C-alpha cells in the first residue's frame, strides 16, 4: 500500500511532462531569408552575384544556403554569397532557401532578365565572278526578345572607307540587304554587326571569294583597206596616218602606188614609204615605169608579212572581257604595228625636166596618183563560258 502511494506522484509528474515535451518538439524557430542580386538585367554570358548574407537564422546559425537559379542549375553553399553565369536568354526567378541548425527553413526570390543577342541569318550567293553584283541578305535575322534591329555593314575589312586610319571600324551600309559591286577577282573579308538596342550585339565575319570569268577565244582574220588619190608636184611629199593595230593584231600588209598615165616620157619618179616610228620600222620603194606598148602604169609596191605571231584559239580566264582583250592585244611579243603608221608619197622628179631649156616652162610639174593599202589583222572574238 505504501509502495503504491510512493509511485503515484512520479506517475503524475510523468503524465504532466509528456504533453509538455510534445509542445517543445513542435516549436521549431524558422530563419528569415534575404536575397540580393547585382545586376538584375544582363546579357547572355554575363555573371550575376547573389548575396544572401543578410539572411537571419533567428535562433542558432544558418547551416546551408540552397540556390536554384531558375535555368536548371542548382547549388549548395555554406556561405551566403555565390555567382552564376547565364548562358541562355529569358527571365529567370532565382530562389534562395536558407536552413538553420534548428531545422527551420525559409526562401527568398529575385528575378533576373537575360537579354539574348540577335541571331544572324546571312545569305551569301555562291559562284561569285568578277564584275558581279553580290546581294548580301541578312533580312531573316531576328531577336529573341523581338527588339528592332540595327544593321551595320563593313563591306571590306581591308579598306579604311572613313579615312580614320582604322579599316576595322567602318560602317558602309545600314540596310538589312546590301548589294556589293565587284570589279576583279579577289578575296573580300567583311563584317556584319547587328544591335538590338537593348545591349545585345552580334557580329559575323563573312568572306566573298570573287573568281575570274572564263572565255572562249577564236581569232578571226580580217582585212582593213585605205585608199587615197591626189596630185603631187615635183619635190613635194604627201603623207597620211593610219592605225590598223587598234583593231586587231597586225599580221601583214600590202601597199600599191600607181601614177596616172603620162604621155610625156620618160616616166616620173615617185617613192612610196611606210614608217612605224614606235617600232623603228621604215620600208620604201621607188616607182618603175610600165610597158608602154601594154599600156602599163608607172607603179611601185611594198609588202611585209609575219609581223606578229598568229593568235591561238583557246579558253582563257580573266576578270572581264575588256581585261582579256587588253591582255591579248598587248602580248609582249605581238605588239608590232599597234601605234601610228605614216604613209608617204614623195614626188622625186617629174621628167622630162632635163630635156628642156631652162627658159621654157616645165610641161610636167607633177603627177596624179592613187595609193591603196591593205592590212591583214587578226581580231580575237570572245564568248563567255559558264563554269560547271
Image (cartoon, helix red, strand yellow):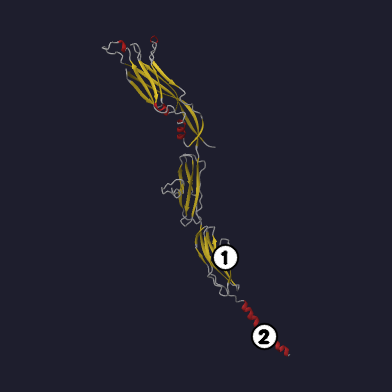
Residue sitting farthest toward the right:
1
Secondary element under disc 1, as helix, strand or loop, is strand
Q: Nearer the viewer, residue 273 or 290?
A: 273
Residue 202 in view (yes/no) = yes
Q: Residue under circle 1? A: 67
Q: Position of residue 146 (x, y in %)?
A: 49, 55
Q: How far apart are marks 1 and 2 (CA)?
A: 49 Å
Q: Which of 343 and 322 is in front in this view?
A: 343
Q: In which quarter of the image is residue 104?
A: bottom right
Q: In this view, does 50 lie to the left or right of 167?
A: right
Secondary element under disc 2, as helix, strand or loop, is helix
Q: Is residue 267 left or right of residue 97?
A: left
Residue sitting farthest toward the top:
293
Q: Please state which of the two labelled residues, at mark 1 or mark 2, is closer to the viewer.
A: 1
Quarter containing the C terminus: top right
The answer to whether residue 25 is above or below residue 315 is below
Q: Crowding at label 2, few (<14), some or many (≥20) Cα neighbours within 10 Å?
A: few
The answer to whether residue 241 is above or below residue 25 is above
Q: Residue under circle 2? A: 12
Q: Position of residue 111 (x, y in %)?
A: 52, 64
Residue sitting farthest toward the front:
280
Quarter containing the N terminus: bottom right
Amino acid at each position: 500500500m505504501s509502495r503504491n502511494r510512493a509511485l503515484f506522484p512520479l506517475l503524475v509528474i510523468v503524465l504532466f511532462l509528456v504533453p509538455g515535451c510534445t509542445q517543445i518538439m513542435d516549436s521549431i524557430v524558422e530563419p528569415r531569408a534575404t536575397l540580393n542580386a547585382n545586376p538584375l538585367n544582363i546579357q547572355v554570358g554575363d555573371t550575376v552575384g547573389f548575396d544572401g548574407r543578410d539572411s537571419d537564422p533567428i535562433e542558432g546559425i544558418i547551416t546551408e544556403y540552397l540556390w536554384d537559379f531558375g535555368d536548371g542549375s542548382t547549388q549548395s553553399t555554406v556561405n551566403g554569397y555565390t555567382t552564376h553565369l547565364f548562358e541562355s536568354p529569358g527571365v529567370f526567378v532565382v530562389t534562395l532557401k536558407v536552413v538553420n541548425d534548428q531545422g527551420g527553413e525559409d526562401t527568398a526570390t529575385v528575378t533576373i532578365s537575360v537579354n539574348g543577342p540577335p541571331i544572324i541569318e546571312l545569305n551569301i550567293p555562291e559562284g561569285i565572278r568578277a564584275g558581279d553584283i553580290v546581294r548580301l541578305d541578312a533580312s531573316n535575322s531576328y531577336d529573341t526578345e523581338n527588339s528592332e534591329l540595327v544593321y551595320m555593314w563593313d563591306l571590306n575589312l581591308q579598306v579604311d572607307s572613313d579615312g580614320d586610319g582604322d579599316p576595322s571600324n567602318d560602317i558602309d551600309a545600314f540596310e538589312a540587304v546590301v548589294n556589293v559591286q565587284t570589279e576583279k577577282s579577289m578575296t573580300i573579308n567583311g563584317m556584319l554587326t547587328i544591335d538590338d538596342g537593348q545591349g545585345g550585339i552580334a557580329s559575323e565575319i563573312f568572306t566573298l571569294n570573287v573568281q575570274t570569268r572564263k572565255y572562249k577565244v577564236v581569232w578571226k582574220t580580217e582585212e582593213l583597206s585605205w585608199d587615197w588619190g591626189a596630185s603631187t608636184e615635183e619635190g613635194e611629199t604627201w603623207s597620211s596616218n593610219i592605225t590598223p593595230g587598234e583593231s586587231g593584231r597586225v599580221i601583214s600588209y600590202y601597199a600599191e602606188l600607181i601614177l596616172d598615165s603620162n604621155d610625156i616620157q620618160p616616166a616620173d619618179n615617185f617613192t612610196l614609204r611606210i614608217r612605224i616610228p614606235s617600232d623603228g620600222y621604215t620600208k620604201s620603194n621607188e616607182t618603175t615605169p610600165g610597158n608602154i606598148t601594154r599600156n602599163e602604169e608607172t607603179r611601185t609596191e611594198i609588202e611585209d608579212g609575219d609581223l606578229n605571231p598568229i593568235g591561238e584559239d583557246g579558253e582563257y580566264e580573266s576578270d572581264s572581257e575588256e581585261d582579256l582583250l587588253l591582255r591579248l592585244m598587248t602580248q609582249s611579243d605581238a605588239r608590232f604595228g599597234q601605234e601610228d603608221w605614216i604613209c608617204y608619197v614623195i614626188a622625186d622628179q617629174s621628167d622630162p625636166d632635163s630635156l628642156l631649156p631652162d627658159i621654157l616652162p616645165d610641161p610636167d610639174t607633177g603627177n596624179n596618183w592613187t595609193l591603196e593599202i591593205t592590212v591583214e589583222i587578226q581580231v580575237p572574238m570572245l564568248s563567255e563560258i559558264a563554269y560547271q
